[in-house]
Image (cartoon, rainbow, N blue to C red):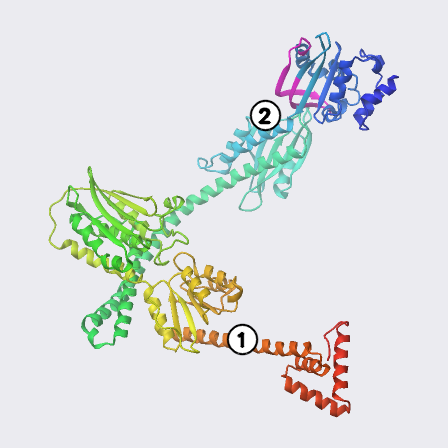
Amino acid sequence: MNDETSARALFPESDPTATAHRAADWASTALGPIDTWPAELTAAVRTVVPSRVPMLLCWGPELVQIFNDAFRPLLGEKFPAAVAQRASECWGEIWDFVGALFAQAQRGEPTLSERMQLFMHRFGYTEETYWTFSYSPVRAADGTVAGIFVATTDVTEQVLAERRAAVLRELGQLSMTETDTADDACRAALGLLAGHEDDLPFGSAHLCRDEVTVTVAEFGTAPGAASDLPEVIARVAESGKAETVADLGRDGDTAVVLPLPVSAGGPAGSLVLGISRFRELNEQYRVFLDMVAVRVSTALSDAQAYEAERRRAAELAELDAAKSRFFENVSHEFRTPLTLLLGPLQTLLDEHAAALPPAQVDAVAAARRAALRLQRLVDMLLDVARGDAGRLDAHTEPTDIVAVTREAAELFRDAADRAGLALLVDVDNVPTRYVATDRAMWTHIVLNLLSNAMKFTPEGSVAVSLRGDGANLVLRVADTGTGIAEAERGKIFDRFYQIGDRSGRSREGSGIGLSLVAQFVAALGGSVSVDAVAPHGSVFTVTVPAVPSAQPAPRAADDVVASAGAAYLGEAEAWRPVATPGAGPREGQPRLLLVEDNADMRDHLVDLLAAQGWHVDVTADAESALERIRTEVPDLLLSDVMLPGRSGLSLLQDVRGDERLVRLPVILLTARAGSESAVEGLRAGADDYVVKPFHPSELIARVRVHLEMSRLREALLAAGEREAASLRTALDTRSVTSRAVGLLMAAHRVDADTAFAQLSAMSQATNVKVRTLAAEIVENFTASLAEPGPPQP
């Protein structure tokens, strides 16, 4: 085999590397002609050449090079001279370092170098590079080292990316809170950049002052100034477009001048960043410089914003105080109309209930409960305002803590019995019965926690206990209710936070109660927490100092509990369960399904709707409503949006997703005002959207309109079905006359008798037999099916 044939056998590929190896004058190297190479060398070449990993083979004492095409990009301008070249000649600029590693491998000792910095000359300049490579001895049959495998990975871009990311990370962590001016911000940023001379050998910052660009910070060894550098700095500051300036000074340095924009508007100045002499200004380098400029601009913006923020701080403090005063004033203003509501309502119930019809007594009682609930909300808003103003202070007085806690808990005894819950009260086992505390705050804490426990416990029990723990009192309210997810427990005491889609007796609530509990407990010098209870439920734990005091006045507990508890009981009264359904609807009587969780609102709506002669079924949640609808489809669904568990919108989505219910009229009721809420409901598929408070006659009118529209729609659909059935019967018959009658029925939207009369009239007018005329109509219709446009009978 001649040398050319051997070369083609060893280097068969068509890539530039294989071509160069076939063309090499191997006979003039220490390896000699290819057909004289030892088996170990040819085997090694057959391993290296097809590999997709960059690999170099150096053979013999002179380390003659053979490499694959994956290695070629690493050579740069050294290719193709590197083919069959001695390693010491190819890598002359780094031989002082790698020569020792080759020598070590030639002694039979493999080497591994990771992320090694080497300054190489591959693209016409001295280049900073980083490599991970290994030298592995290749042994001959006699055990001596005949060659060296070099497996190489160029990690330059990875190292540079990590190094530059660290610079940007440090700039991003630069704190501007200790700098007062933009100059300080620039000095701090450039002081940090000064420690990264590998990528940024020098730099300077220039800010615009009265249409003049002023240098405010520098780092590194500044190059000799180019004649046009000041003009470039000013031009970039004005235009906002970066420019590159080359051949700065005697050493020919290059710098990029970048704009420094701030959030308030255009550029605030310019940033000059020097380019490393050992790296090409490629896209990655340019992106890095742009990001440095962005970070410095952010520092400038932060410095300016920090000063503006300090100016706004006083304004915000005054605004916050004004907000607190507003809440407090509005809360006080509410008290007068509430007093005028509650007083007459209570008088009616106390003195005139016997003279009023039962329905009116119930209506007055419901109005009083609504007013009490509004009073409770006003009181909470007032406490919020006081807390925000820092005036929610505890007013301690001698308190029978056992009596207050027991009386507050027993207020819910009737509500618990109605709900089928066991109310367990264990408050006597305390070492200190008489303590100095704020009696009203403690009462609200107990009432609020009990109210929540009752609200979210559909079955089982609610337990209240009071114990002593050293110098503290520990109140626990535990329930077997729906529980609180672990992710929610850290937020449950936040202002206005409410758990979404939580099942309970009502979806109503302001999200203020538990946050006020936390504020009251803090004012008493204690703490509050919530934990899960196995297998389900929650336990709220309140710990407050037990400061012994003298015995309070008799009945003091009753007075404070009675005044605070009325509003809580009014809310609990609205959780009454849905009454057992009565008789079904009469023949032809419209049937409505009402979904409302508030018992008072439910009773009010039932009275309004039933007075119109409509039959009303009621449920308090979406799941029960959906089950009722699928059992017997009503004529109209009237649902509140805010329901315990799933919302009214979720119920609507299920209804519209059922083919049998797509035409069911749905009206949503909501306390959320505004066009966005209405659009949300209508977009979900509601037929109408009524905002509380509404006028009774408006609601009745809307329900009546949708009932009538639904009736007419169903009648039209039924008539259409009957007409279609008649047409299908006519077309299915073999009689040509019957088919023609069917076509006339469809074309003129008439019944069969009218269509036959029209056919007879046409026969008399044209003096054509009915059967012949019918055949022509059918034939024309059949022909028209093959033509564009609507068929014409």
Circle 1 is placed at which residue position?
713
Q: Where is residue 120 in the image (x, y as percent from the top left)?
A: 69, 21
Quarter of the image with the N terminus in it: top right
Q: In this view, does 266 lie above or below 718?
A: above
Left or right: where 128 falls relative to 467: right
Q: Can residue 152 be seen in this view?
A: yes
| Residue closest to the eye, 610 or 761 | 761
Q: Label 1 sits on what residue type?
A: Arg
Q: Can residue 124 be seen in this view?
A: no
Secondary structure, magenta segment, majority class: strand
Q: Where is residue 257 in the image (x, y as percent from the top left)?
A: 63, 35
Magenta residues span: 105-134
Q: Label 2 sits on what residue type?
A: Glu
Q: Position of residue 769 (x, y in %)?
A: 76, 89
Instruction: Find residue 197 and name its label.
Output: 2
| Residue closest to the eye, 232 or 362 | 362
Q: Which residue is drawn at 49% across and 61% down?
A: 653
What is the C-alpha distance between the residues marked 2 and 1? 81 Å
Q: Residue at x 78, y 14 (%)?
A: 39
Q: Where is residue 441 in the image (x, y as percent from the top left)?
A: 23, 50
SS at badge 2: loop
Characterize the local packing of mark 1: few (<14), some (14-19) or many (20 or more) Cα atoms within 10 angstroms: few
Magenta stretch encompasses residue 247: no
SS at badge 1: helix
Left or right: where 631 falls relative to 168: left
Left or right: where 669 falls relative to 603: right
Q: Which residue lies furthest to the right in this view?
A: 2
How many tags in the picture?
2
Quarter of the image with the C terminus in it: bottom right
Q: Are marks 2 and 1 in contact (CB under 8 Å)?
A: no
